[in-house]
Amino acid sequence: MTTTTAAPTALDEAHTAGQNPLDYLRARGYVQDVSDEAGLREAFDAGAVTAYVGFDPTAPSLHAGHLLGIMMLAVLQRFGHRPIALGGGGTALVGDPSGKTSTRAFVSEQDIRANLAKILPQFDRHLDFEGGRFGGNPPALLLNNAEWLLSLAYIPFLRDIGRFFSVNEMLAAETYRTRLEGGGLNFVEFNYRIVQAYDFLHLFRAEGCALQMGGSDQWGNITAGVELIRKADQGHAFALVCPLLTTASGQKMGKTEGNSVWLDPAQTSPYDYYQYWVNVEDPDVARFMRLFTFLPEERIAELTRVEGESLREAKRVLAFESTRLTHGEAAAQEAETGARMVFGGANLSAEIILSADSDVVPTTVVSVSEINDTITLADLFVKAGLASSRGDARRLAMQGGLSVNDARIDTVDRSVTRSESPMLLRAGKKRFRRVVIS
């Protein structure tokens, strides 16, 4: 296996010197629409541009689907521009109807605050909040729109901001039209576009922010902010949206076996995060390398000019670089070592794998109380993520696809005792998990 060398956390200056960041963003696949391309290009050439992306904290972690927005901010910072990662502590209380056929479940203000506390540190590996880490770049900002949205007075807000919005135009927007045709839209969600547009106006006034970026489903909301800035302040601002990504098979980006791939290591371990990227479909490898790493184009072309099994090295590099960006160098090295051990497990005894460092081999910990309440092998295979259900575990065992400590099993309905810990569970040739009873 090729030894992994530390790839740049900054852009390769030899290939990007003098390049307009809009050209880089477009070449890497980040750009679907721009509101005023010539104007934005000129703004980038004229000096540092402040740009923001909003992230609503509806869960206690961001997931891989949020990475496009984070990476766009990261690219601009490495070009010397100033990024703002905006936590939606206020907008999350309203609920974004974009892409939804029914009303979003309301999240309490307490839960949103708790989610934000966990989410905000997840930007730190991609963005530099101190300044200077990637050269002469200005420091990024981390803000929460609850700071200005929750203090708004309703009547003055309607008079000063609401008057710039046409109800007819809003109802003609696809998001609102789809919801109305499908069963209704509540008044709270109807206001989402207005409060997101106000975010842009506030940041334009307070931080000189001239660019908002996001997914293509946000195009109407973002351009509403551009128009609000023009009408309220006679200002000139820009919108840029990226495509909404799906995998080659049509699966939503950042999902694996129906579950989200979280950026929080407590929810998706660095090993499992690495596995998500190393197992992407062949047609996605080059595209994901351009979007989710800072590898130069020449290196990507070199790695992906092959097909089939020969793409294994490209997938390894993609997995390592993506994991390194999100979890750091040490975690990426451990995940790669664990993958090498586990996927070479057919040639390694259970004794060798079970004696390896717990940070290297993927491990599931089961509490003694669960054992005392009687847990079966089927339960362990489900807890280890090697079977989707007890019935699935029984089916796999009957087909000869499951083993425990290198011994094939034909039943999974027996109880497990504490003395059996640790155990090496295997499903098929490549899927392993160590189980420890704690």
Image (cartoon, rainbow, N blue to C red):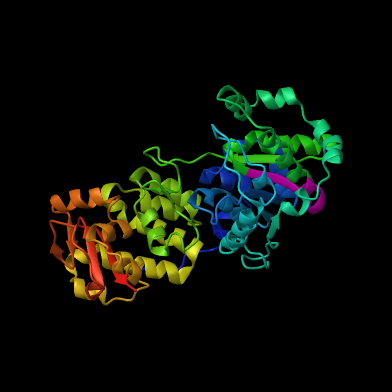
Is any part of residue 322 visible from this angle?
yes
Q: Does the magenta stretch include residue 207?
A: yes
**Does 225 sit above or below residue 277?**
above
Q: In this view, does 194 lie to the left or right of 347?
A: right
Q: Is residue 206 left or right of residue 114?
A: right
Q: Where is residue 316 in the image (x, y as percent from the top left)?
A: 36, 59
Looking at the picture, tell me which residue is in the foreground, 19 or 77.
77
User: Which sits in the foreground, 8 or 196?
Assistant: 196
Residue 15 falls in image quadrant:
bottom right
Query: In the figure, 179 relative to 121: above or below?
Result: above
- Residue drawn at the location 77% of the way across and 30% of the way down: 165
Residue 355 is drawn in which quadrant?
A: bottom left
* The C terminus: image quadrant: bottom left
Quick one: which residue is furthest to the front in this view?
A: 373
Span colored in magenta: 202-213
Q: Tell whether 132 sits left or right of 365.
A: right
Residue 148 picture location, percent across and down: 78, 51
Q: Residue sitting at 70 percent across and 45 percent down?
A: 211
Give how far across and how far down residue 12 sits, in percent. 54, 59
Image quadrant occupied by the N terminus: bottom left
Picture quarter containing residue 360? Answer: bottom left
Q: Where is residue 206 in the image (x, y as percent from the top left)?
A: 81, 52
In the image, taking residue 347 as reference, residue 249 lies left or right, namely right
